[in-house]
Image (cartoon, helix red, strand yellow):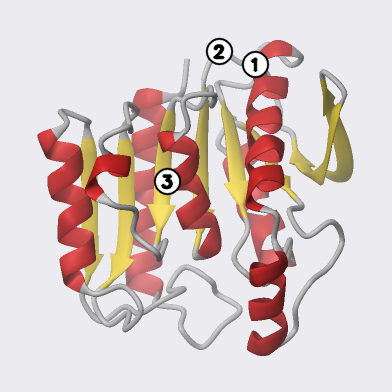
């Protein structure tokens, strides 16, 4: 479990790599919250590795980590989305082309949830499945229609930034497009309910979403 740099066709991506004990049953890209590549994101990568996946968390802020919301907001505003997309895609391609992993899933939290959806929409991406945790800034229906890979979604019912109507729209758009999906709105949970380092942590919702994540990637990624 190391901080490292992966290289795919000259695209170098900083991040945290967590290796499974044996042969990887699949790959998982873990995308950070708006804080940056924090220890809790590394722990999540470790947890997927413990389940047999090769897990890589790209450092999209290139070493910067926010300690308070205003700083995090500045980092989000300064993020070069095109570069982040290329880094995520390079991580996926590296797993497949260099490490020989057959399928790769993507899971993201907060900002990373939105980037996970964007990855699923991107025709250049080689991702095979996604798990979106409370990703805000819901794309338009015509953008969601570009998604072809199975999507698991985990949202908090009390998340003021992501109203129920947005969550319902995501579910409806995926279902209309014939995309396998399982979108859950957790009662009593708010934004960032999976982050056990924050007051927003909601243990029951976090535990259930983790169980669903393992089942989802077990079905659509694992070999």
Pointers 3 and 1 in contact (CB under 8 A)? no
User: Does residue 210 appear in the picture of this structure?
Assistant: no
Mark 3 vs mark 1, foreground winner is 3
Q: Which mark is residue 102?
A: 2
Which corner quadrant holds the N terminus? top right
Q: How far apart in space, not on screen, are marks 2 and 3 (Cα)? A: 21 Å
Q: Nearer the viewer, mark 2 or mark 3?
A: 3
What distance separates the C-alpha of mark 2 from that of mark 1? 6 Å
List x then y, in percent, for residue 90.
70, 29
What element does badge 3 sit on? Answer: helix
Q: Classify residue 52 as left or right of residue 123.
A: right
At horizontal 78% and vertical 60% (from top left) the residue drawn is: 61
| Label 3, label 1: how far apart the Cα atoms are | 20 Å
Residue positioned 56% across, 83% down in the render:
198
Asked if residue 40 can be seen in this view, the reply is: yes
Based on the displayed image, in which of its 4 quarters is residue 72 positioned? bottom right
Q: Which mark is residue 96?
A: 1
Residue appearing at x 73%, y 66% in the figure: 38
């Amino acid at each position: 479990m190391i901080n490292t740099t992966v290289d795919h066709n000259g695209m170098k991506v900083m991040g945290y790599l967590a290796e499974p004990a044996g042969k990887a049953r699949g790959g998982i890209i873990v995308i950070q919250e708006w804080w940056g590549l924090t220890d809790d994101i590394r722990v999540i990568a470790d947890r997927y590795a413990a389940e047999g996946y090769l897990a890589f968390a790209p450092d999209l802020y290139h070493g910067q980590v926010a300690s308070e919301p205003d700083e995090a907001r500045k980092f989000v505003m300064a993020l070069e989305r095109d570069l982040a997309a290329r880094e995520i895609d390079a991580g996926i391609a590296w797993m497949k082309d260099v490490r020989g992993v057959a399928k790769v899933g993507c899971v993201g939290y907060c900002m990373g949830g939105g980037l996970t959806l964007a990855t699923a929409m991107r025709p250049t991406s080689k991702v095979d499945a996604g798990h979106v945790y409370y990703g805000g800034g819901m794309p338009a229906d015509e953008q969601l229609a570009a998604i072809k890979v199975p999507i698991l979604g985990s949202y908090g019912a009390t998340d003021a930034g992501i109203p129920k109507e947005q969550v319902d729209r995501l579910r409806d758009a995926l279902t209309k497009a014939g995309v396998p999906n399982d979108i859950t709105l957790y009662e009593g949970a708010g934004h960032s309910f999976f982050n056990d380092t924050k007051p927003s942590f909601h243990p029951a919702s976090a535990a259930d979403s983790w169980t669903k994540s393992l089942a989802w990637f077990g079905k659509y990624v694992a070999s």
